[in-house]
Image (tube, helix red, strand yellow):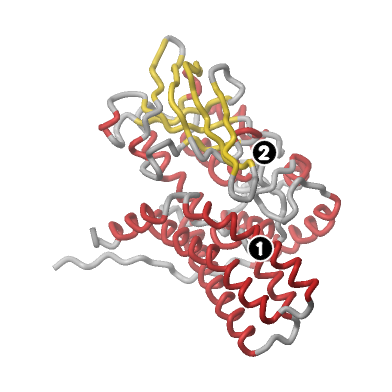
Amino acid sequence: MSAIPKLEFPPFRLPPSAEALRTEVRAFLKTTLPGLKTEDRYPSWNTPSPEFSRALGAQGLIGITWPKKYGGQERSFLDRYVVTEELLAQGAPAGLHWVADRQSGPLLLRFGSEEQREAILPRITRGECYFCIGMSEPDSGSDLASVRTRAEPVPGGFRVNGTKVWTSGAHRTDYCIALVRTSGQHGDRQRGLSQLLIDLKSPGISIRPIINLAGRHDWNEVTFSDCLVPESALIGGEGDGWLQVTSELAFERSGPERFLTNFHVLRELVRVVGRQPARRAASVIGRLVARLWTLRQMSLAVCGMMEAGQSPAIEAALVKDLGTIFQQDLPEVARLLAESDATTDEDMADFLDIAQHATMMAPAYTIQGGTTQVLRGMVARGLGLR
């Protein structure tokens, strides 16, 4: 009888050098954030701020793992993890460069051409070039292998037709890395898929806003109508898109943004119940913090495996799934606790506003980085259960 597969989250600790970097990042944020004005009332990494992205780039804190020839610092994934944690904990407005730093840049480093790297990566590290992800499509959900957007080879490049949906930030970014079908038929699933680096200023592209429950314009529907892109836009080889996109998702699914996006809600809850909370309040907050710490340890384990050159796609999927549950639970649990334990009516009014906004944003977590059902299917297959 063959052994039953199991998920591994080996204990992992950040080295002293990474913790030293944490001190530097905190000092930078302490002096930089108070002077920024953004359109959002609540601190969040989703908030766009060109000013902040450029300031962070000037500090060498974007693309820090990348080669110095492309503007990086050649530091470890562990250093990057620390930077990400601090940005999230302080609600820094890093939304413009986030995708480029987290996954588009690493994708180009691994699969892109030298021409693409030299043209794009230094601009990302300076905080001047922003990306969105062209994966999801109408009627496809998280089933990426069912994409219908087609890039027909033509002399000198490709003619792209199709629609992408839930495309975060497309209205304010420069490029889209789009998963398209360059050969074969819709029923071929993973075969015939490629990724293209598409300049969003190209003719034949229309971007329609999708307004979310909180009244924000973060998502978009992006339509390609006979959009011509050059042959140099192909990332890697024709037909390599499935390999590329699955490796890319490991960067997206396991980072601390999957459990720290609502950190400001927990921080505000601790403030409104006071320094000496009642026993019940202390117990509830303790359980929330224990869940958060467990997710952090799991995420750190994935980071350590990536630093060691492994591809922990199944472990990353589980971190994302459990992080989604935590982030959707947190606003409601916090609201109920604050209603009974807030120290002043003024504190309660402010906190309810924060919790309400977080509750309206929570449904999006189920979609971002892969729907819950798809992720659980991945984990089940990884454990040999289906």
Amino acid at dot 2: Gly
Disc 2 crowd, CA 10 A, few/some/many (<14, 14-19, 20+): many
In depth, the one of 317 and 218 nearer the eye is 218
Q: In which quarter of the image is residue 5?
A: bottom left
Which quarter of the rendered picture does the C terminus lie within?
A: bottom left
Of 211 and 130, the residue lying toward us: 211
Q: Is residue 335 visible?
A: yes
Residue 153, relative to residue 82: is it above or below? above
- Coordinates of residue 160 in the picture (x, y in percent): 45, 21
Looking at the rendered structure, the kind of residue marked 1 is Ser
Q: Quadrant of residue 361?
A: bottom right
- Few, some or many residues within 10 Å of mark 1 (<14, 14–19, 20+): few
Gap between marks 2 and 1, in whole Å?
A: 21 Å
Q: Residue at x 61, y 79 (%)?
A: 285
Q: Quadrant of the N terminus?
A: bottom left
Farthest-out residue, bottom: 279
Does any portion of residue 122 appear in the rendered image? no
Q: Position of residue 128 (x, y in %)?
A: 70, 35
Residue 250 to residue 211: above or below? below
Q: Which mark is residue 71?
A: 2
Q: Nearer the viewer, residue 312 or 177?
A: 177
Q: Residue 17 carries which label?
A: 1
